Image: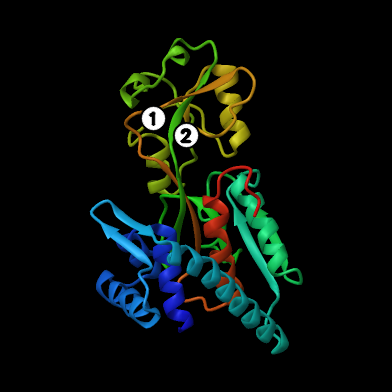
Amino acid sequence: MELRTLRYFVAVAEELHFGRAAARLHMSQPPLSRAIKRLETELGLTLLVRSSAGVALTPAGTVLLDEARALLDQADRARVRVAAAAGAATTLTVGFLGDTTDPGATRLARAHHRRHPHVEVRIRETDLTDPTCGLHAGLVDIALTRGPFDATGLTVHELRADPVGALLRSDDPLARRDSLELADLADRHWFRFPEGTDPLWQAYWNGGERRRGPVVRAVQECVQAVLWNGTVGLTPVGHAPGEGLTVVPLRDMPPSRVVVAWHEGDTNPLIRSFVRIAVPAYRAPDGDDR
């Protein structure tokens, strides 16, 4: 079994979908399907059950997923150690979009330290005006952020999709609703990002419309604008809104996608390992710190 084939298998097993796995691997679906079929033939086992609903792991596939992850982790550690012996950097600068309290980030930090205890990770937390967290400016090696944004020259991989809701004062008449639509907020003042902010990012968090309201740069500024002035805005439903505030789910808003991004073509083994550790860390149930 080649490491490349094991990476293909892990991608399919984690995504449970050949199309998403192919996109994650930056390849087309037919060669990915052929590689998995060759692996099953080599082992003489069925690893995946394919259906119109997607893909499911067989018992043998579940065992191979655990073993393949362990082998790939060991290979990544070997690359990092060899690179360090050759004088390559053992420091990784990670950009965060004001979300370092995310349980996924906590799990990632623990898992990364267990696997790379001698790698120094430097954190650069940015405000809401730069969704690439310094990638385009060359200030970080890799970013944990949310889309959408201008991804020119970057490789972007989705880690999780979070439902989005309206952030409101608890005494707002709309706060009593079970759910809302964007049209319910059309005549309200929204918090907005400064001029020059990535237009894809600005448009998403404004619900696809031009809005009027206060300009903010940081998460706390958004919260205070709602609390003090009754401004509205969007936030992931899972975020704790704080005292005096509530989040009401939006039925017609696409989810906010948590992503990891890095410079296209960067061959730093620390980045490859970081991404591999991030995928299960962000998809594990809250409370699971493995």
Which residue has dot 2 on it?
A: 192
Disc 2 crowd rating (10 Å Cα; few below 14, some 14-19, many 20+) is many
| Marks 1/2: CA–CA distance | 7 Å
Q: Nearer the viewer, residue 186 or 61?
A: 61
For the residues labelled 1 and 2, say whether their Cβ atoms are less than 8 Å apart: yes
Mark seen at residue 211: 1
Query: Residue at (27%, 51%) from the top-left corner?
Result: 53
Amino acid on which disc 1 is placed: Arg
Query: x, y (%) of residue 238?
Result: 53, 34
Query: x, y (%) of residue 201?
Result: 42, 46
Query: Residue at (66%, 84%) from the top-left corner?
Result: 83
Q: Quadrant of the C terminus?
A: bottom right
Secondary structure category for the residue under label 1: loop
* On screen, residue 171 above or below 79: above
Query: Residue at (61%, 17%) from the top-left corner?
Result: 244
Query: Residue at (62%, 82%) from the top-left corner?
Result: 79
Query: x, y (%) of residue 156?
Result: 44, 61
Give the mark nearer the N terminus: 1 vs 2: 2
